Image (cartoon, helix red, strand yellow):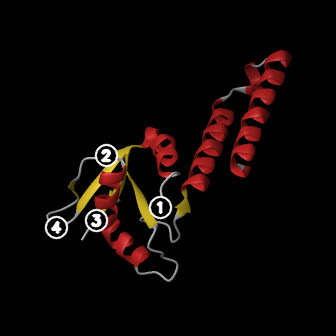
Amino acid sequence: MSKIYQKYLSLKNSKDYTDNTLYLFKSGIFFIFVDEDAKKMSQVLDLKLGKLNEDIVKCGFPIHSLEKYMQLLASTPYHVEIASTDSQDPFSSQTYLQNESIRQIVHKILQTNIDTLSISESYDFLYEIQNKFNEVVRGNKN
């Protein structure tokens, strides 16, 4: 049995599970739903069903399309949580997207060679980073 499917079963059997909760897993460059969640989402989102293994179905979309699909799911009765095989608790899609935005900002900061920036470029850089963080915080409140 795959780690994803084991985690899926564990989450479905947890005390926090509700009937309208669906679990989305990051698998390589895709997000996938499995088993019963995949069957529901293939109909709701018009996604093609494939096989996770001989007995279990899956469907999904590329990771860069997460926001698009979360917007589509916002008008459904389903609550999607993003789960990982190596962490205990799943994230809400909003928290996951916020964490990804922060990760991108931090990556940009780490990739910037501050020794080569002029005073004007430093100011612009700080202003841009501040605006990006403000967008993340505002997005979290909406």
Q: Return the mark for residue 46.
A: 2
Q: In which quarter of the image is residue 107?
A: top right
Helix, strand or loop at disc 1? loop
Q: Which amino acid does label 4 sit on?
A: Asp
| CA–CA distance in space, label 1 to label 4 | 24 Å
Residue closer to the observer: 103 or 110:
103
Q: Which of marks 1 and 4 is nearer the N terminus?
A: 4
Q: Cβ–Cβ below 8 Å for labels 1 and 3?
A: no
Q: Cβ–Cβ below 8 Å for labels 1 and 4?
A: no
Residue drawn at x 47%, y 44% as measured from the top left: 66
Local crowd size for mark 1, using a 10 Å CA cut-off: few (<14), some (14–19), many (≥20): some
**Residue receiving disc 1:** 78
Local crowd size for mark 4, using a 10 Å CA cut-off: few (<14), some (14–19), many (≥20): few
Residue drawn at x 31%, y 68% as measured from the top left: 5
Q: Residue 86, image x and y in percent?
A: 45, 65
Q: What residue type is labelled 2?
A: Asp
**Mark 1 vs mark 4: in front:** 1
Q: Residue 105, image x and y in percent?
A: 66, 38
Residue drawn at x 50%, y 83% as measured from the top left: 15
| CA–CA distance in space, label 1 to label 2 | 15 Å
Residue 124 as seen in the image, left or right of residue 108: right
| CA–CA distance in space, label 1 to label 3 | 16 Å
Task: Note whether 10 is above or below 132 in the view shown.
Answer: below
